[in-house]
Amino acid sequence: MNYAQYIDHSLLHPTATSKDITRLCNEAVQFEVAAVCIQPVFVSLAHSLLKNTEISVATVVGFPLGACTQEIKYEETKQCIQLGANEIDAVVCISKVIEEDWEYVTTEINELSTICKQYNICLKIIFETTYLNENQIIKLCEICTKASVNFVKTSTGFDFVKQEQGTYITIGAQLQHIQLMRKHCGSNVQIKASGGIRTTEYFLSCIQAGANRIGTSATKDILKGL
């Protein structure tokens, strides 16, 4: 099994520079991963570096909060595609999911799906499962299945949870959420796990739980352990 093809080699940190993205793309070629996942400002650079390879350029939309207006999210998607993105990882409006404003959420996901299909682009919808209950995750799976999105995705990796002492931690991809998403998505929808996947053991556990794609910045260490 070619495990590298499960990986979106990712660098979404706000301090990442063009030099870092160039290194990321060179590593992606070396490791023969499925895609790189980067911020929109670097899409043109990644596209130019990877245009003669089979590695996709994935970028993020509405990242990381999903809280911009629908119109901004749609335009960001179109612009990223025009700049050379092959895959769009769009954050659902988390607040509207928590409010269970399903009309708003459905409209947004349907429109994103329509835009991506128009350009033959892979769409991944990021749930940010840390903040959601099981019923909300299940409902999102049903909406995404009906909209025929390509992937549902667990996390942004920026799902900060405040602790009693005032510090913050991130939770990321949890096996029970991957299993829940796999159970309630149609067979036409794949699962991407991301956030905190840094070891070979957990990488393999995510795949066993149902993930078809893994977003990680620890690609080298994960593949070294296989």
Image (cartoon, rainbow, N blue to C red):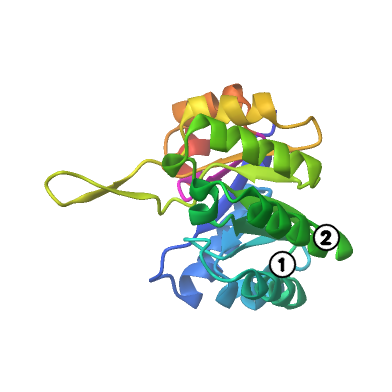
* Left or right relative to 197: residue 152: right
Q: CA distance from mark 2 to mark 1?
A: 16 Å
Q: Classify mark 2: helix, strand or loop.
A: helix
Q: Classify mark 1: helix, strand or loop.
A: loop
Instruction: Please state the horizontal and vertical placement of residue 148, each as a whole percent of the image.
Output: 81, 45
Answer yes or no: is residue 168 visible: yes
* Left or right relative to 92: residue 161: left
- At 79% from the left edge and 30% from the top edge, which residue is drawn? 187
Q: Residue furthest left?
A: 165
Eyeballing the image, is 161 above or below 41? above
Instruction: Please state the horizontal and vertical placement of residue 19, each as a whole percent of the image.
Output: 48, 74
Q: Nearer the viewer, residue 143 or 46?
A: 143
Q: Amino acid at mark 1?
A: Ala
Of the two numbered discs 2 and 1 on the same chain, state the one appearing first in sequence: 1
> Is residue 102 found inside the magenta-colored segment of the image?
no
Residue occupied by mark 2:
114
- At 45% from the left edge and 45% from the top edge, which residue is drawn? 195
Q: Amino acid at mark 2?
A: Thr
Eyeballing the image, is 73 above or below 143? below
The magenta segment: 212-219
Residue occupied by mark 1:
85
Instruction: Please state the horizontal and vertical placement of residue 12, each as a whole percent of the image.
Output: 48, 62
Instruction: Please state the horizontal and vertical placement of residue 21, each as a whole percent of the image.
Output: 52, 68
Eyeballing the image, is 112 above or below 184? below
